[in-house]
Image (cartoon, coloured by chain):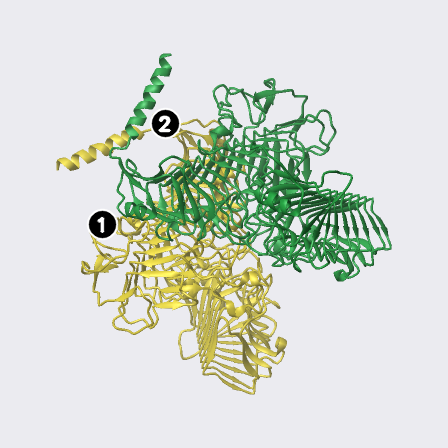
Chain colours: A yellow, B green
């Protein structure tokens, strides 16, 4: 009891010491008053923005506080100051704090929403943005680039913020290091909640990027710690570390379709992070390593199915004498005291080895340099069901030293390596879903490599010294908060519960007018049941929310006759529009489109599911305009009849790795009499690190299609990484080729019947345009 | 007085604190006793090697001292323990000291003479080699590679040592960083005297190399301070920094034909060094910069004539997205508060720009990336006579900010830049030969860039704060020793006076026997006068020292008739052989060679001067065998008559940038009836940073030569960088070409008369084999 009291007293003393000596409150209610207050700001000032909507404000917070007396810009009530419209915040100077703002319903007019810098000379130092949020702040189209937070200068912090939903081009947060005033920055990104970021369909959608290849020699020393990454699916890299001496500690990566990647730069620390996957996804990755001197310790990988670039541990091959922007060889890397639990093929070495492509790629693209001077030691792999191939060696592993690793593969036989011992080890819960070995291993000889004594604690901070144990956890934590408790992350005032907790409603529309009216008034997630037999629509139905439009019965189809203008769509997909159309016969007059995105201003993605429908007599079934993007397009148990064009998703012709949809799924459907572009799905530009899109066509029938197909090609999937054609019938299609699959990538076909429809060919290597 | 006393007391106290508590002296007199002592060494032991010759000893000093009680291996008397023969020293462990050894008359059997490491795991930490020397320790041939000192591990020191004369391949000292136990090494190379290193004729002859391109991402933090580099002419880089965060402080580079180069790696400090040139040499350079974040401050450059790669300040162009082993762009570099005094075209920017070679070189070789975010400020250029072009811009300088620099060009007109102010500034002596501005500049506005406040002191350590002055020196130092005092450097016991202070002698040889005898007994530097008219020699005369052999009069020629075996030379040039032959008619019998190197074991270079002679009736005038090297080959006022071959220096055919002679000079001479290889001088392999060899032919006549010349080429100078043909006559030579000069390099011809001898052509770009 006495001890506790002593400790408390010490804390109070510290708070007392750190107290501001000279706080001066200034309340401002509009941008003009704010500007005046900022112009006159002195150390110790607290400028309080009154609650409400601050629309179209460009705040330049340039001031000089000091360590004892920073200058603060804060919301009257945290979260109640909404920065909206064409707005941004630029911070320059020293010891500044921004507290409690919410950027929402707007977009930055510049290249950043929050910028720790005014220009190259006036950057921020010792400045913080805390307790704030950025949501719904996308630029009008996904090709318009910005950052939501840009770091420049030194010693800046982003803490306890909520940031989610960025869908336009550009990392969510980026550290810039060009210029000596931004190196050795020791920035901190801590305790934030990075909410869902949808896939962008192409590169440049990292959640955090630290530097770029041009500044990859810079010492950065940025710390990313105690953050929660919730479904950050923007692209293959959740975090892209491109500078030196960065530290990634105690973050949770929750079902995020990407990896923490040491892309450029060297000597990073990846310690005590948790990576959580999902049995249903093979897109969720772990740690991917490129370069020199990284230490990967105390991490916990759970339920991850990602492979190769997305594997739970991906140790890459490099390019010999790599160009600055390509792949440095892995050297002097240490992977120690980590746990992989229920992951599929968790250890992959020589990832990216592409010696077999040396005929079509320039020499400067061939990743033939295998990892060297690399140590993998004291790790644990635990599988509840046997894994056929826990270790995948894409190339030689002669340069890797495996020492004192342990696996329980439940007796499953696999090709192992020296230094991975099979033991019938039992597990117990350490905390929440985190497992640890049930018993200590007094006789097991752990490896003590150079500076392994620096791995002092485990995932939960318990000292390792007293324990002789492989893996990330050596002791059940007694006093550590559960890292899965999301209330630890982001601002207190922001509701991070992303489940749809508002009650959804079902509307019944007995007439066309009622349908139009219901669509307009429905809330996100509502359902409209079509109670009449037939609806006559003359202008596009706007889909700008999540909505289900359904005929009443699975056994019949309600007709929607669309007679709008030529080239207009029956259903116009707006940003955030998510349509499920069910039990409907949608009929056109040959000149219209059944579904189309907006031609421009697709600031967010749309989704489309068509189930148990007939789509007939349209010019296009789906027309995806340039810069539009859909995460899911699904046709289930649907017939497409007598249309000039089918699904057209091939507008991203700049060959920069972009594409128009992430997942296209067609099952149990029929395409008959579709003249051309039956499926036209395109991704151009060689960038091996982009790993989409995905096309799955199963149990479907294609007849009398493709009479006017370009190149006589029925299904055009040029550049798409994952294509699966299974158990389909292609009968009497007047084409030369059903499809041309990309053998080197994940393209495959099985169980298809092809009759009078040309051939299905596999081409190992496509000629591609290099993107860089 | 009292203050002084206080200081002294403090020093004594420190010494007292640092005193070893437990010294145990063990004297050893042979390797067996030494091994026993080493095997049992304990903290505090001092193992004393008795004076004398320790021949063929391979010392493995593996032991573990501690900070208070290191383990010392020392000479009974410093300098009196000679390590000779096939010997080396490997050091592994902690807190070890090696003191007073002299490695001489031998060679290492391994890849290093002194190695701070046993193998990759057992390296040295906190170990020192002090007060020692390495001289005459070359491997048998120059292509055999070794290091004289290799650093591995961390916190090791080379202090107060003398190291000179390395002529075989490999840097004299190298820091190795492969492996985490050798990064962040904080090694110190201090107070050493690096004596003359002769040119090697090709790459890999740096005096200090820090890392290599493969480890160029490693943080090194090596300090090279207070050393004297005396004519370190091995290659174009005296110091080649290839890692990060190295510091080069207060060194003197005295007439060293090379530069301090930040070749790979970034963020180095080059502060307070002195670079001294020589009016007679255009090979002596200053600082050459590649990469990011270097700070070049407080340096003093004097009398330097080097250009482009060797210019006093060479800021290079980079290759866009450079491969790891090529040229990173210069970014974020600061060059501030330096002085250039009496240097020719001292500032050169965009050095290495080679966009004009894009047709013959691959894209990955084109240095088109100009320096960016680079600051040149507060510097001083002072010329006693006007310089036509103080600033040479090989490419755009738009990315460089020039601020508050000052020049006194004595009114000479030149093309200047913004930020370089012309002032009639007067200079005064600061210390020794170092000049500084005579008057302060109260009205001059110095530039205060980011972190310029960190440049706290000047070249001599005087505080800058109180002075407003451009250049390296702001105040006459009062208490600082003269950096030019060579007694500060190296071991006390080593006589660094390199002038030949032993008296040389003249011998007279009246008979052949007397000549042979005199040659054998002569000391280095002696002269043998030939008093007879004719000498008959039947076997080669060995030249293994510096010797003059001279007929008595300039007006006549003494005959030496050589009748030795076929293909044997009259004069056999051994390592360190330097022959001046004067007033002699050397005659063969068509089958012999006049001069030749050894066929192997040319562990050091040879030199040859032939003055006022006739050389006739030989198969070869000079035959240079593979791996032999000569710094100077001079033919002055000499006739070469009726020989099958002339000067044959073309054995380095591996195309790795090597060549057989550095300087070939032919003046006022005649070549008549030389059938082929009149001059055959070859250097192969593209490596733009190798800047030799040198061929000067002036005022000479070539007649009836080349009837059997290869390709019909009289003078073959393929790959030689510097070729000057001036005021020669080429008459009646049955060849197609007199010479094919390399236009892109420093090849030129003027005032030559060519009659009935084919053409002299200039080819801008040679097809060359890339070396890497």
Q: Which residue is mark 2?
A: A23
Question: In this view of the protein, can residue B260 be seen by the observer?
Answer: yes
> In x, y percent, where is residue A512?
49, 68
Question: In this view of the protein, can residue A246 be seen by the observer?
Answer: no
- Quadrant position of residue A500: bottom left
> In x, y percent, where is residue A547?
43, 64
Q: Which one is earlier in the sequence, the residue at label 1 or at label 2?
A: 2
Q: Which residue is mark 1?
A: A465
> Looking at the rendering, in which quadrant would you find the C terminus of chain B?
bottom right
**Dot 2 lies on which element?**
loop
**Dot 2 crowding, Cα within 10 Å, few <14, some 14–19, many 20+:** some
The front one of B620 and A338 is B620
Viewer-side label of 1, 2: 1
Answer with left or right where residue A718 lies relative to residue B548. Answer: left
Q: Tell me the number on the disc at residue B477.
A: none
Q: Give me the chain letter of mark 1.
A: A
**Dot 1 crowding, Cα within 10 Å, few <14, some 14–19, many 20+:** few
The front one of B247 and A735 is B247
Q: Give me the chain letter of mark 2.
A: A
């Amino acid at each position: 009891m006495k001890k506790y009291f002593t400790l408390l007293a010490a804390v109070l003393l510290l708070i007392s010491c750190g107290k501001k000596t000279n706080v001066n409150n200034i309340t401002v209610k509009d941008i003009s008053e704010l500007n005046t207050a900022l112009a006159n700001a002195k150390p110790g000032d607290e400028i309080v923005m009154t609650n409400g909507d601050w629309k179209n404000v460009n705040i330049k917070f340039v001031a000089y506080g000091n360590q004892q007396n920073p200058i603060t810009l804060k919301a009257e009530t945290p979260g109640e100051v909404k920065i909206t419209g064409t707005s941004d915040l630029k911070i320059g100077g020293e010891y500044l704090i921004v507290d409690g703002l919410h950027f929402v319903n707007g977009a930055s007019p510049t290249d950043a929403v929050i910028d720790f810098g005014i220009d190259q000379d006036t950057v921020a130092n010792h400045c913080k943005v805390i307790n704030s949020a950025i949501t719904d702040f996308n630029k009008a189209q996904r090709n318009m680039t910005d950052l939501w937070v840009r770091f420049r200068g030194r010693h800046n912090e982003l803490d306890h913020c909520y940031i989610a939903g960025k869908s336009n081009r550009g990392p969510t947060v980026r550290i810039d290091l060009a210029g000596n005033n931004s190196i050795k920055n020791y920035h901190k990104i801590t305790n934030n909640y990075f909410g869902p970021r949808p896939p962008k369909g192409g590169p440049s959608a990292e959640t955090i990027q630290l530097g770029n290849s041009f500044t990859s020699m810079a010492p950065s020393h940025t710390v990313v710690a105690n953050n929660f990454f919730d479904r950050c699916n923007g692209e293959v890299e959740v975090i892209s570390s491109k500078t030196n001496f960065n530290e990634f500690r105690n973050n949770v990566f929750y079902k995020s379709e990407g990896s923490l990647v040491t892309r450029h730069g060297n000597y990073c620390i990846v310690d005590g992070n948790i990576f959580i996957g999902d049995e249903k996804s093979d897109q969720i990755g772990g740690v991917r390593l490129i370069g020199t001197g990284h230490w990967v310790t105390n991490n916990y990988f759970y339920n991850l199915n990602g492979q190769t670039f997305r594997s739970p541990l991906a140790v890459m091959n490099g390019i010999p004498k790599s160009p600055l922007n390509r792949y440095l060889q892995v050297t002097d890397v240490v992977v120690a005291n980590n746990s992989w639990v229920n992951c599929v093929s968790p250890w992959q070495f020589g990832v990216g080895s592409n010696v077999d492509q040396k005929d079509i790629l320039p020499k400067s693209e061939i990743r033939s340099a295998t990892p060297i001077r690399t140590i993998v030691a004291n790790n644990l792999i635990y599988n509840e069901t046997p894994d056929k191939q826990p270790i995948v060696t894409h190339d030689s592993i002669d340069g890797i030293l495996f020492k004192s690793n342990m696996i329980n593969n439940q007796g499953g036989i696999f090709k192992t390596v020296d230094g991975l011992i099979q033991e019938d080890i039992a597990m117990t819960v350490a905390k929440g879903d985190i497992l640890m070995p049930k018993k200590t291993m007094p006789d097991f000889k752990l490896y003590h490599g150079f500076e392994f004594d620096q791995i002092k604690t485990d995932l939960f901070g318990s000292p390792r010294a007293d324990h002789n144990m492989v893996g990330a956890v050596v002791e059940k934590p007694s006093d550590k908060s559960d890292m899965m408790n999301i209330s630890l992350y982001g601002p207190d005032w922001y509701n991070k519960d992303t489940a749809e907790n508002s009650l959804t409603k079902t509307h019944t529309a007995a007439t066309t007018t009622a349908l139009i009216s219901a669509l307009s008034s429905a809330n996100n997630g509502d359902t409209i049941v079509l109670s009449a037999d037939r609806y006559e629509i003359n202008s596009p139905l706007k889909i700008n929310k999540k909505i289900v439009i359904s005929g009443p019965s699975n056994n019949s189809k309600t007709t929607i006759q669309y007679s709008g203008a030529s080239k207009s769509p029956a259903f116009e997909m707006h940003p955030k529009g998510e349509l499920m159309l069910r039990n409907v016969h949608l009929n056109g007059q040959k000149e219209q489109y059944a579904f189309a995105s907006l031609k421009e201003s697709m600031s967010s993605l749309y989704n489309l599911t068509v189930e148990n429908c007939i789509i007939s007599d349209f010019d296009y079934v789906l027309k995806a305009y340039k810069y539009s993007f859909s995460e899911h397009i699904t046709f289930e148990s649907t017939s497409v009849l007598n249309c000039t064009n089918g699904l057209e998703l091939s507008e991203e012709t700049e060959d920069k790795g972009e594409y128009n949809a992430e997942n296209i799924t067609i099952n149990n459907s029929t395409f008959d009499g579709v003249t051309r572009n039956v499926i036209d799905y395109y991704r151009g530009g060689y960038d091996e690190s982009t790993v989409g899109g995905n096309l799955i066509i199963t149990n479907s029938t294609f007849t009398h299609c493709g009479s006017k197909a370009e190149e006589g090609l029925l299904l055009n999937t040029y550049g798409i990484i994952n294509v699966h054609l299974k158990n389909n019938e292609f009968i009497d299609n007047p084409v030369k080729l059903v499809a041309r699959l990309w053998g080197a990538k994940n393209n495959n076909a099985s169980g298809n019947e092809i009759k009078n429809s040309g051939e299905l060919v596999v081409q190992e290597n496509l000629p591609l345009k290099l993107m860089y």
